[in-house]
Image (cartoon, rainbow, N blue to C red):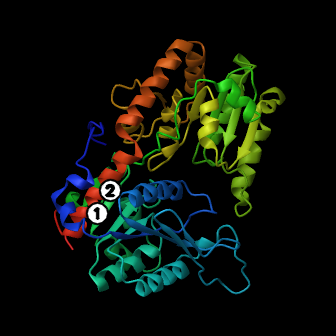
């Protein structure tokens, strides 16, 4: 990747300040947000989307989240300014709906097209992550002459190079439709670079980072009280990892490092917050169990698996240090959540992501080489051994997130892009 500065602009013209927005301000903008995985199925992108919809609704937009239905979930929710519509896709005979019923992509795409056709009042469709619903949305948008915005979420899965190199059924048609969206969001410079490599016109691509609610994720001075409230260990350093306990997230690297960390800091504890049950994936189940089995008894006793939680903000606020050795991300929202809580962060290098998040000076967090558990051990030791330095890093991290990744700032950028698409200005002329 070419050397570039990844500083996020400090400000953007807000929705109310753009000329094209004034022309649209007489009526609400109705945005269809299409995403296959959404609560009750856990999805980091789903959580980010819901946060964005809350902000957009406060600004007069009318977002509707269109997602895949699941057993036991409401088919429709009317929330504060936005809706969630869950479509029940057809399923193969003899297959029951489960937590991953959204895997039936073509069925979800068909239902998405049907729902959009029954609700022709949408002004814009914004598709999150690559599923067959992208192509159904493309057809609807072309038929109704409405703009389509596609957002990439993960390197190696729905980035442009991976899509263009795919050789699955109807690959040529899918690649042709993929190239003909009206606009594209890259949530990091790493994904923007993949657009360049795939030969996409750069005037259709904008980098819009993920955002965080800095009023929810914030520094708490009295961690001792919070630990008692959450029934967490009161004494000793508390390290935390947030994410699915899978190979891609580097859980094996973290557990290998934990052996040495615990040997040097026997009073320390490690919290693992994230999906740790894989009923639909025996390989992931065996992988996690195998890595946990390698831990010495003492180190294993100081590891606590918390599963998927809805109080991640409080868990981060109660911890002393955030460790995240992920191998592959599209952005890594949990990093800015930890930073917003004033936590010093130790993460493995993700070019075009970690430098983008922490800044070029590297003073808002610690980045180590991929696959190097010894570097993680050293970084943890240096941070825990110097509380004053840890505090400085945490303060800088919080400041950087407030300045650059506050969800209100991120919403400004989405609104500006929506406005340009709707007004037929600049990239993605309809």
> Which residue occupies the foreground of this view, 317 or 34?
317
Determine which of the numbered discs, if any, sits on residue 414 in the image.
2
> Which residue occupies the foreground of this view, 312 or 260?
312
Q: Is residue 362 visible in this depiction of the protein? A: yes
Whether 74 is drawn above or below 365: the answer is below
Q: Is residue 169 left or right of residue 224?
A: left
Identified at 34% across, 45% down, the residue is 409
Determine which of the numbered discs, if any, sits on residue 303 in the image.
none
Q: Which quarter shows the N terminus? A: top left
Whether 173 is drawn above or below 277: the answer is below
Q: Position of residue 90 (x, y in %)?
A: 61, 84
Residue labelled with disc 1? 418
Q: Position of residue 36 (x, y in %)?
A: 53, 69
Q: Secondary structure at mark 1?
A: helix
Q: Position of residue 121 (x, y in %)?
A: 36, 80
Categorize mark 2 by other alpha carbons within 10 Å: few (<14), some (14-19), many (20+). many
Q: Which quarter shows the C terminus? A: bottom left
Identified at 35% across, 62% down, the residue is 60
Q: Is residue 83 left or right of residue 287?
A: left
Q: Secondary structure at mark 2?
A: helix
Identified at 32% across, 74% down, the residue is 123
The residue most toward the right is 297
> Which residue occupies the foreground of this view, 116 or 198?
116
Tell me, yes or no, whether the two marked residues, 2 and 1, touch with CB atoms within 8 Å. Answer: yes
Q: Position of residue 363 (x, y in %)?
A: 40, 23
Categorize mark 1 by other alpha carbons within 10 Å: few (<14), some (14-19), many (20+). many
Q: Is residue 377 left or right of residue 144?
A: right
Identified at 62% across, 37% down, the residue is 314
Measure how far apart labels 2 and 1 are at the Cα level.
6 Å
Whether 262 is drawn above or below 314: the answer is above
Q: Quadrant of residue 205?
A: bottom left
Q: Is residue 190 visible in this depiction of the protein? A: no
């Amino acid at each position: 990747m070419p050397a570039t500065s990844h500083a996020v602009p400090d400000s953007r013209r807000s929705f109310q300040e753009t000329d094209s927005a004034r022309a649209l301000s007489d009526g609400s903008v109705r945005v269809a947000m299409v995403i296959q995985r959404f609560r009750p199925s856990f999805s980091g992108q789903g959580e980010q989307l819901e946060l964005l919809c809350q902000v957009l609704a406060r600004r007069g937009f009318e977002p509707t989240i269109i997602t895949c239905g699941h057993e036991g979930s409401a088919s429709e929710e009317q929330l504060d300014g936005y809706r969630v519509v869950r479509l029940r896709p057809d399923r193969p005979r003899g297959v029951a709906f489960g937590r991953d019923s959204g895997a039936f992509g073509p069925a979800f795409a068909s239902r998405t097209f049907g729902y959009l056709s029954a609700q022709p009042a949408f002004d814009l469709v914004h598709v999150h992550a690559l599923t067959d619903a992208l192509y159904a949305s493309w057809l609807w948008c072309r038929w109704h002459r409405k703009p389509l915005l596609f957002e990439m979420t993960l390197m190696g899965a729905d980035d442009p190079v991976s899509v263009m190199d795919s050789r699955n059924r109807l690959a040529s048609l899918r690649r042709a439709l993929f190239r003909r969206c009206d606009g594209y969001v890259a949530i990091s410079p790493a994904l923007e670079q993949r657009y360049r490599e795939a030969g996409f016109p750069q005037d259709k691509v904008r980098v819009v980072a993920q955002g965080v609610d800095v009023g929810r994720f914030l520094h708490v001075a009295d961690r001792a009280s919070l630990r008692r409230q959450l029934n967490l260990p009161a004494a000793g350093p508390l390290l935390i990892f947030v994410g699915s306990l899978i190979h891609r997230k580097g859980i094996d690297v973290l557990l290998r490092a934990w052996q040495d960390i615990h040997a040097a800091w026997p009073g320390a504890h490690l919290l693992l917050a994230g999906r740790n049950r894989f009923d639909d994936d025996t390989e992931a189940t065996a992988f996690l169990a195998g890595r946990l089995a390698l831990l010495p008894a003492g180190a294993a006793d100081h590891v606590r698996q918390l599963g998927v939680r809805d109080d991640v903000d409080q868990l981060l606020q109660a911890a002393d240090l955030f460790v995240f050795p992920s191998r592959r991300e599209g952005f890594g929202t949990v990093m800015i959540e930890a930073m917003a809580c004033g936590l010093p962060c130790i993460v493995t290098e993700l070019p075009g992501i970690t430098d983008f998040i922490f800044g070029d000076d590297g003073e808002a967090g610690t980045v180590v080489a991929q696959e190097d558990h010894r570097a993680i051990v050293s970084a943890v030791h240096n941070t825990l051994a110097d509380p004053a330095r840890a505090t400085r890093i945490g303060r800088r991290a919080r400041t950087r997130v407030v300045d650059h990744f506050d969800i209100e700032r991120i919403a400004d950028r989405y609104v500006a892009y929506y406005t340009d698409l709707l007004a037929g200005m600049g990239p993605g002329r309809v």
